[in-house]
Image (cartoon, grey):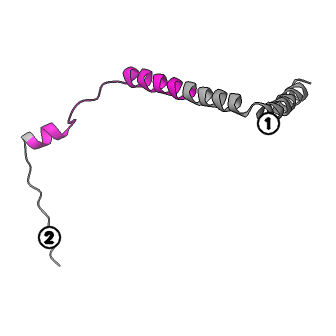
Amino acid sequence: MGQVFAVCSFGGAYIVARFLTFEKAALIGVLLTLIVGASLVAVGFMRVFLAFSMKRATVGGNLSRASAQPQRVTKSRKHI
């Protein structure tokens, strides 16, 4: 029953939106621009929040130890 109501309400909203688009195109253009702008602002806030909630990474990691103590790499040859 809930699914039927959702489909009918979305269908009705689609029909109303079509009529409004033909009647007031400039208003719909402004509304769509505001919706896109609001979604971009929300995504920006989400990215900043996620960036600050990440764990801080160590700079260099194991590379700093590897460069402090260089090791020789030798190839072993097998004699036949």
Q: Which residue is pictured at 11% across the width and 61% down the height?
A: 74
Identify residue for label 2: 77
Is residue 2 left or right of 45 when viewed as pictured?
A: right
Q: Are marks 1 and 2 in contact (CB under 8 Å)?
A: no
> Who comes first in sequence, dot 1 or dot 2?
1
Quadrant holding the N terminus: top right
Is residue 78 left or right of 68 when viewed as pictured?
A: right
Q: Check disc 1: other Cα within 10 Å, few if <14, some if 14-19, many if 20+.
A: few
Q: Which residue is pictured at 68% across the width and 31% down the height?
A: 26
Q: Residue furthest bottom?
A: 80
Quadrant holding the C terminus: bottom left
> What is the tally of numbered marks visible in this picture?
2
Q: Give the numbered dot on residue 22.
A: 1
Three-letter residue code for mark 2: Arg
Asked whether 51 falls inside the magenta stretch, the response is yes
Viewer-nearest residue: 69 or 52: 52
The image position of residue 35, as x and y in percent, is: 62, 27
The image position of residue 63, as x and y in percent, is: 18, 40
